[in-house]
Image (cartoon, coloured by chain):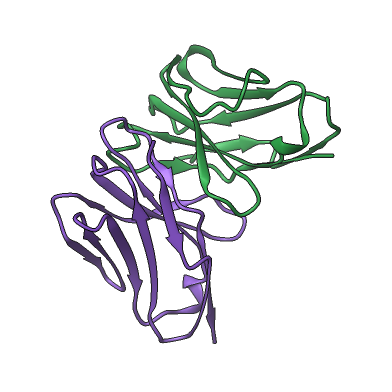
Amino acid sequence: EAGVTQFPSHSVIEKGQTVTLRCDPISGHDNLYWYRRVMGKEIKFLLHFVKESKQDESGMPNNRFLAERTGGTYSTLKVQPAELEDSGVYFCASSQVPGGTGELFFGEGSRLTVL
Amino acid sequence: GENVEQHPSTLSVQEGDSAVIKCTYSDSASNYFPWYKQELGKGPQLIIDIRSNVGEKKDQRIAVTLNKTAKHFSLHITETQPEDSAVYFCAASGDDYKLSFGAGTTVTVRA
């Protein structure tokens, strides 16, 4: 069975440009999460989808970030316009049960570098 | 919200020795405490977890202990091997299902 896949693995963009990250969760997993790790710090929660609905987006930094989950399948996270402080590794994770009660399955991450 | 502190940030051990990573949390309502291991080039992977109704859990060479009164929990790896080299993250969550992670510990096992 395929795991969580993320694309691209690495993106380098200029400040002010737009980047879209994609996540394909494990098939059948209703719960999808986005997390971000900045420069050796903690992995910070961004948001949680249950199917196509945003369950919790309290971790989204500001309105430059837009997450969608079309039809409850794959998800995209768009950053527009990108700022220097957006650099980091963006992880997507999925689970059958809510992440606070069971295992989260993480993708390998998308490393974003904003110059 | 929940705040998880993790120490040390780096840990170097001789192969065969033990490694201990400690975490503290702030929210007394937290009741689920997983540990994730991230190997180079991969995403974090769950290695062990513990719930608030249990004080200790063991799985082969790894064990986790939880002290709810003091709000801290620890990961113990015995008889370390080169494949234990990785970044380890502790996390905590309550009924909001939102995991809060520590900053990670980079463990290096020296041959």
User: Which image quadrant for residue A10?
Assistant: top right
Above or below residue B76? Residue A115 is above
Above or below residue B43? Residue B110 is below
Taking depth in this image into account, of B80 and B51 the one nearest to the observer is B51
Image quarter where the C terminus of chain B lies is bottom right
Give the chain ID for the green colour: A
From the viewer's perspective, tell me whether residue B75 is left or right of residue A94.
Answer: left
Residue B80: x %, y % from top left: 42, 79
Taking depth in this image into account, of A64 and B62 the one nearest to the observer is A64
Image quarter where the N terminus of chain B lies is top left
Above or below residue B38? Residue A49 is above
Give the chain ID for the purple colour: B
Above or below residue B17? Residue B37 is above
Residue A92: x %, y % from top left: 53, 36
Q: What is the residue that sits farthest to the left in this orientation?
A: B53
Residue A25: x %, y % from top left: 49, 31
Residue at 64% across / 17% down in the picture?
A63
User: Which image quadrant for residue B24?
Assistant: bottom left
From the viewer's perspective, tell me whether residue A67 is left or right of residue B51.
Answer: right
Taking depth in this image into account, of A86 and B109 the one nearest to the observer is A86
User: Which image quadrant for residue A78?
Assistant: top right
Residue at 47% across / 85% down in the picture?
B15
Residue A61: x %, y % from top left: 59, 27
Residue at 48% across / 41% down in the picture?
A3
